[in-house]
Every structure is written in structure tokens, then in C-alpha cells.
Amino acid sequence: MNARAAVFAALIIAAGCATAPPAGDGAAWPVRRAELQSLDQWTLRGRVAVAAGGNGFSGGLDWQQQGARAEVALRGPIGGPGYAIHVDGDEFSVTDRSGETFAGVEARALLAERLGAELPVAQLRYWLTGVPAPGVPAQETQGPDARLAELEQSGWRIRYGGFRAAGPLMLPARLDVMTTGIRLRIVVSDWQLGP
């Protein structure tokens, strides 16, 4: 084999071993949807306002997703005490302002009482990144930018009101998560991808 053929063969082998880059924001929606649904390491920082009936509250929101697990901190106004939510798949526990931890049915009841409805925490991680939760029927409405403008899933409606860059991706900057009698408005100040 001459030197030129050897170099050509090495380039072909190296190209076959290369990892494809993320599809990013320029790809077609089905490709981007699949990429965002597989996104499992990210951190979101922002604010949340909750309106439930005649009651409401607002505060800070930090969400760190690591695979099926997440650590969520809800802070009260002006950095006051809040709640810590520890998510593992469909299960979660809540530590309240006094430091008492509730799990299982008690945790669900505590959040439902505070928010006015049971929050689908396992699906929310997907809604936050601008996609439906996989494996659950959903109705998607795309905007003129070929991103989700609205999503309906599991009795909830999510409206997206802007996106911001996070590496090669565009992730939601504002969203309203609503069901009968409750609305969560989330404004994201920072997205970080990876561990």
C-alpha cells in the first residue's frame, strides 16, 4: 500500500469513529424533539409565580436535572425560606421550610395543597426544556419559529413565550404551565447544559 492510500484509509476510519455533533436548533422539529427529550443533565435558574384560585406566591426556582433524578429548590420572596424537592423518576419527596421531609402520598398532598393541584413532576422536566414528555399522548402547536408555541399533555397546557440560547440549543425563557384553577409562570434567567 502506498503512503497516499494509507493516509486515505486512515481518514476514512477516523471519520467513521467520529461522534456526530448535537443536531442543534437548525434541525427539523422531530430531530430536535428527540434530542431535547434525551437531554438529561441540565440546570435551570429563574423565578416562578404561582396563581391558584385567589391565592398565589412567587419566588426563586433552581432545578438541577441528573438523569431521572432532580434537585429542585423553590425559594420564597427576597430569598426567604421555601421548599426542597428531591425527584427520582415518578417519585419525589419535599422538605418544607421547617426542615421536615415528606415522601410519597404525603409529598404529593403537600404540593397539591400549596399549589392547588397535583403537579406532574416527572413530566415537568420535559416541559421545561420545551418538549412533551415521551410516551404520553400530547398535542403540540408549533410557532412560526418551528419551536413549540403550545403543548397540551396530561390535562395541562403549556404556553411558551420565548427561547434563549444554551450551547447549540434554544431552550424556553418563559412558559406558563396551566390546568384548571392553577397557573405557574416560569421565567428562566440561566440555562446550563451538562453536569
Image: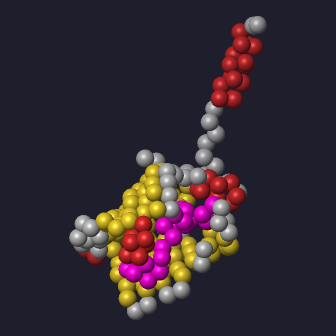
Q: Which residue is drawn at 72% across and 24% down?
A: 12
Q: Quadrant of the N terminus?
A: top right
Q: Is residue 39 left or right of residue 192?
A: right
Asked whether 152 or 44 is in front, the reply is 152
Coloring basis for residues = secondary structure
Residue 23 x/y as whole percent: 64, 49
Asked whether 113 or 14 is in front, the reply is 113
Asked whether 162 or 40 is in front, the reply is 40
Vertical arrangement, residue 90 with respect to residue 81, above or below: above
Vertical arrangement, residue 108 with respect to residue 54, above or below: above
Vertical arrangement, residue 16 with respect to residue 129, above or below: above
Residue 57 x/y as whole percent: 35, 81
Q: Residue at x 47, y 80 (%)?
A: 117
Residue 103 x/y as whole percent: 38, 65
> In the rendered structure, does residue 149 fall within the stretch colored magenta?
no
Q: Is residue 126 left or right of residue 59?
A: right
Q: Which residue is drawn at 65% across and 25% down?
A: 14
Q: Can residue 91 be seen in this view?
A: yes
Quadrant position of residue 25: bottom right
Q: Residue farthest to the top?
A: 1
Q: Residue at x 51, y 76 (%)?
A: 177
> In the rendered structure, does residue 116 fall within the stretch colored magenta?
yes
Q: Can residue 189 be seen in this view?
A: no
Q: Residue farthest to the front?
A: 105
Asked whether 136 or 31 is in front, the reply is 136
Quadrant position of residue 133: bottom right
Q: What stretch is highlighted in magenta?
A: 111-134
Residue 8 x/y as whole percent: 73, 19
